Image: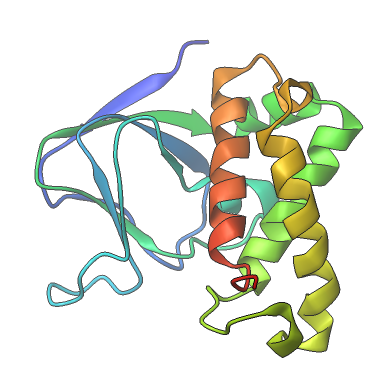
Amino acid sequence: MSDQVRKYRPGTIVFREGESGDYACLVKTGEIELLKLATPNVPPFATLPPGHMFGELALLDGSPRMATARAGAKETEIVIVDRVRFQAKIKNLTPTHRELFEFFAGFIRETPIWVKPNFDQAPPELDARAKRIATLIPAIENSDRMKTGDAFIDVMVKMLVHYAKRRLPASG
């Protein structure tokens, strides 16, 4: 089965915050804006260029969408990976990769983007997880062992690391 590609005109909503997530997306051309609220006056908190993934957390943990996604200023094409294909990809991973995805997804969903200066100010229940994530990130970024050979999954690993880094307190 081949990937499904969808085209969106500028400003078109791909999905809304709170909806169930039955597919993940990879930006092929154009850009995707992520918004916390789907109102015209709220600026996006992120703009994703080609090669970036979005919507994957809903497939990992079955939770509702965390944000609204809409096409940016240009016509945008996205590659869709539905739940069945995604689960087949995950099933073929090693137990270590599956555990890593679940750990990172849980951390990302439960942890706000930090504004506090260091780990000493982290709530106790998040402190141990944040420290563990902080030690895993360099190992993942600097090792080819975490590559799966599946381009979609390898991009997903990069995105999970990126999202996790945004939620770590600044060190130092």
Position of 86 compared to 22: left or right? Answer: right
Q: Position of residue 20 (x, y in %)?
A: 51, 57
User: x and y percent of residue 52 in the render?
Assistant: 41, 37
Which residue shows up at 30% across the image and 74% down it?
37
**Taking 170 as reference, is 57 above or below it?**
above
Quadrant in the rendering for residue 63? bottom right
Q: Which quadrant is the C terminus positioned in?
A: bottom right
Residue sitting nearer the eye, 8 or 102: 102
Q: Residue 114 at what x, y percent from top left?
A: 55, 77
Residue closer to the observer: 104 or 144:
144
Q: Residue furthest front?
A: 172
Q: Position of residue 145 (x, y in %)?
A: 79, 23
State which quadrant residue 4 falls in: top left
Which of 112 and 87 lies nearest the eye of the viewer?
112
Work out whether 23 lies above or below 119: above
Question: From the viewer's perspective, is residue 88 above or below residue 169?
Answer: above
What residue appears at the point 70 percent right and 89 percent down from the top-left corner?
Answer: 121
Q: Is residue 15 left or right of residue 131?
A: left
Q: Residue furthest right?
A: 95
Instruction: Please tell me whether residue 47 is drawn above or below residue 4 in the rendered image.
Output: below
